[in-house]
Amino acid sequence: MELRHLRYFVAVAEELHFGRAAEKLHISQPPLSHQIQDLERELGVSLLHRTRHFVALTEAGRAFLEEARRILSDSDHAVATARRVGRGEVGHLSIGFGPLLAVGILGRIINGFLADHASVKLDLQTLNTAEQVEALAGGRIDVAFPILPVSHPEIVTEVVASEPLVAALPANHGRGRSRVVSLADLRSESFVGISRSAAPTFHDLVVRACGDAGFAPSVEHEANYVLTVLGLVGAGLGVAVVPGWIANRPSEGVTFRRLSGTSPVRIGVAHRRGDPSAPLLAFLEAVRTVSALRPRLNLRVTAGA
C-alpha cells in the first residue's frame, strides 16, 4: 500500500463519484478504479458499494476513511516539518559571544534572524574568545563571535566588524581637545582595563599596543564588561582603550578620541568547518546582512570638550 492509494480512496470517498474524484486527482477514471480495486484486494475487504447509479461507503470503508485521513495528515505534517527544518526555520542554535561584542550588533542580528526563523530556539552564552573556540571545537556551541585571529583547523571565521581602537577619557581630560591621541601621550596615565579573565585576547592586544608605544600601562582598575570600564572612566578613575563601536553610544562623563598608530580590533563570526545545519546557514546570512549595514565610527571634537 502506498500513500497514493490512500489519497485516491479519500478522493472517491469524499466525492462518492469516480468521475468527479478522477477530475479532482487530475487522472483518468479507469486507472483510478483499478487503484481502488488493488487497494481492496490488498486489504481483503470491500471499501465501497458500487452500482451504475451510485457509490457508497461500506462499514469498513467508513472506518478506513477516518484512518486514511489521519495518515495523510500526519504525512503532510512530516513533509512540512522536514521542509521547514531544511530551510532553517526550526531547530536550535547555541551562540557564544564575548563582552566586547556590541550589544546593539548582536540584538540586530538576532532580531533579523528571528523575523524569518521564529521557531529556532537560541541559547546565548557569554564566553571569552578562548572559551568560545574551545566550546565551538567541542560541539557545545554552534556559532561564536571571537576576537580575530582564531587559528584552529576545524573552525572557519569571517570578519563581522573591524574596529579602530579609541581612547576613552574623562570628560575634562586635557587630551580631549585633540582630534587624535597617541598611546604614547597616555604613558603617564592610570588605566582602567578589561580584565584578562574576561577578554584575554583584547587585554593582550592593548598591552601589546602600549608596549609598541614604548611603555607598560599602569592598570589601576579592571572590570569584566566594557560598559563598566566606561563607568569607571566617567568617574575620573583613569583612561581606557576600547573598541570603536562603543564610541557610537553616549557615555556620561566620557570623551572618545581616535588613537593613532594602533591596529584595529577585528570581531569575527565563527563556526565549525563543514557544519551543514540549515539554522546555522540562515543565521550566518543574518550576520552578513547586519555587518554590511553597520554605521561607521564618527568621532567629532565638540566645543569645550
Image (cartoon, rainbow, N blue to C red):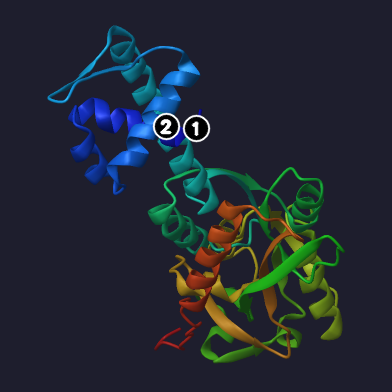
Does 25 sit above or below residue 9? Answer: below
Give percent across and percent down for residue 195. Answer: 74, 56
Q: Residues within 10 Å of mark 2 (few under 14, many from 20)?
A: some
The furthest residue to the top: 59
User: Mark 1 sits on what residue?
Assistant: 2
Residue 69 shows in the view = yes
Could you tell me which residue is drawn at 55 percent across and 63 percent down? 102
User: 128 and 4: which one is in front?
Assistant: 4
Report if the CB atoms under discs 1 and 2 are less than 8 Å apart: yes
In the image: residue 79, left or right of residue 229: left
Q: Label 1 vs label 2: CA separation?
A: 5 Å
User: 267 and 245: which one is in front?
Assistant: 267
Residue 217 shows in the view = no
Mark linked to residue 5: 2
Does 187 sit above or below residue 114? Answer: below
The furthest residue to the front: 52
Could you tell me which residue is drawn at 58 percent across and 54 percent down? 278
Could you tell me which residue is drawn at 46 percent across and 89 percent down? 301
User: 68 and 250: which one is in front?
Assistant: 68
In the image: residue 237, left or right of residue 76: right
Give the quadrant of residue 210.
Answer: bottom right
In the image: residue 45, left or right of residue 286: left
Instruction: Name the amino acid, label 2.
Output: His
